[in-house]
Image (cartoon, rainbow, N blue to C red):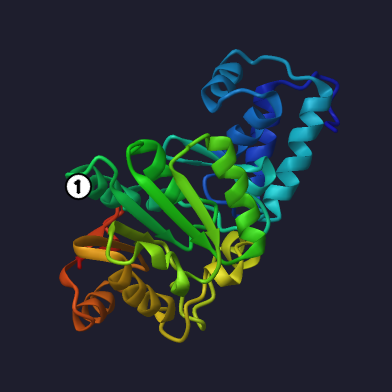
Amino acid sequence: MSDTAAPDTVRSVRDEAVAVLAQAGVPDPEVDTELLVGFVLGVGRGRVQALVVMDAAIDTSDAERVRQLTLRRAAREPLQHITGTAPFRSLELAVGPGVFVPRPETEQVVQFAIDALRAVPSPAPIAVDLGTGSGAIALAMATEVPHARVFAVEKSPEAIAWTRRNVESSGAPNVRLAQGDLADAFPELDGTVDVVISNPPYVPDAAVPRDPEVRLYDPPVALYGGEDGLDVVRVISSVARRLLHPGGTLVLEHGELQGAQIRDLLTADGWRAAATHRDLTTRDRATTALR
């Protein structure tokens, strides 16, 4: 609670929380604070900013709740775990312990798959998401290309609980979810798929992420991909060649230093036109190839 006699305002609570998060080294403390305040008040970030300008009052209980959540964020618990949701393109996904939190850069990666699906001259193009996690990629394809049939597989029992929740809440009727190893995914689709996409674990085992939010909270199975980070990519190359028809498209997200290795790997496996694409920060982020 505040030691001052003056009543709390949205501005004073916001400024206090920003200072706490900045002291803790949280990136973008202003953004996170406004999202936390909005979460407590049940409003969007823009409304929070308006309330700050108006120096509006805030209930004592709400102010205390913001302070409690701020301390959790200052301990580097992911914002998405605190609010229970993660935005992804037009979606609002449920996330929490046991599932990888979708990142903004993946929003750009999935655009390659969406564009490829929209270009397919078929009334019902087929896409497969290998290692779907929260379901972010699969649901983006399903909702933005509603005439597509989207198949998604996830091995982790902890993660797939979140996937099922998101598929159900999306209401998308064109998603089929399976639990199992991606190496064995959907044999009934062999040779018929138009697009295969994956955001696999690609962090080399020895490259421990710097951010505590990633290192301490994202499941290791979704992060680490072997000595060079490409163990799962090698499996995906084989699986995708099985699933895709000739001319089908593969889309892979990866680390910024892995583009050349992945292009070489795919080319050696018989893929055509392997190309690496940069994200909005000009870092190599995705590689596409044709079956």
- Relative vertical location of residue 159 with respect to residue 65 in this rendering, above or below: below
140 sits left or right of 170 in the view: left
Q: Is residue 22 visible?
A: no
Please tell me which residue is depicted at 74% across the width and 41% down the height of the picture: 69
Foreground: 213 or 190? 190
Would you name the residue on which mark 1 appears?
A: 120
- Relative vertical location of residue 144 with respect to residue 285 in this rendering, above or below: above
Q: Quadrant of the N terminus?
A: top right
- Spot occupied by residue 195 in the image (x, y as percentages of width and height): 29, 56
Please tell me which residue is depicted at 64% across the width and 33% down the height of the picture: 15
Q: Can residue 42 be seen in this view?
A: yes
SS at circle 1: loop
Please tell me which residue is depicted at 68% across the width and 38% down the height of the picture: 17
Foreground: 164 or 34? 164
Q: Which amino acid does label 1 sit on?
A: Val
- Relative vertical location of residue 19 with respect to residue 161 in this rendering, above or below: above
- Spot occupied by residue 114 in the image (x, y as percentages of width and height): 29, 46
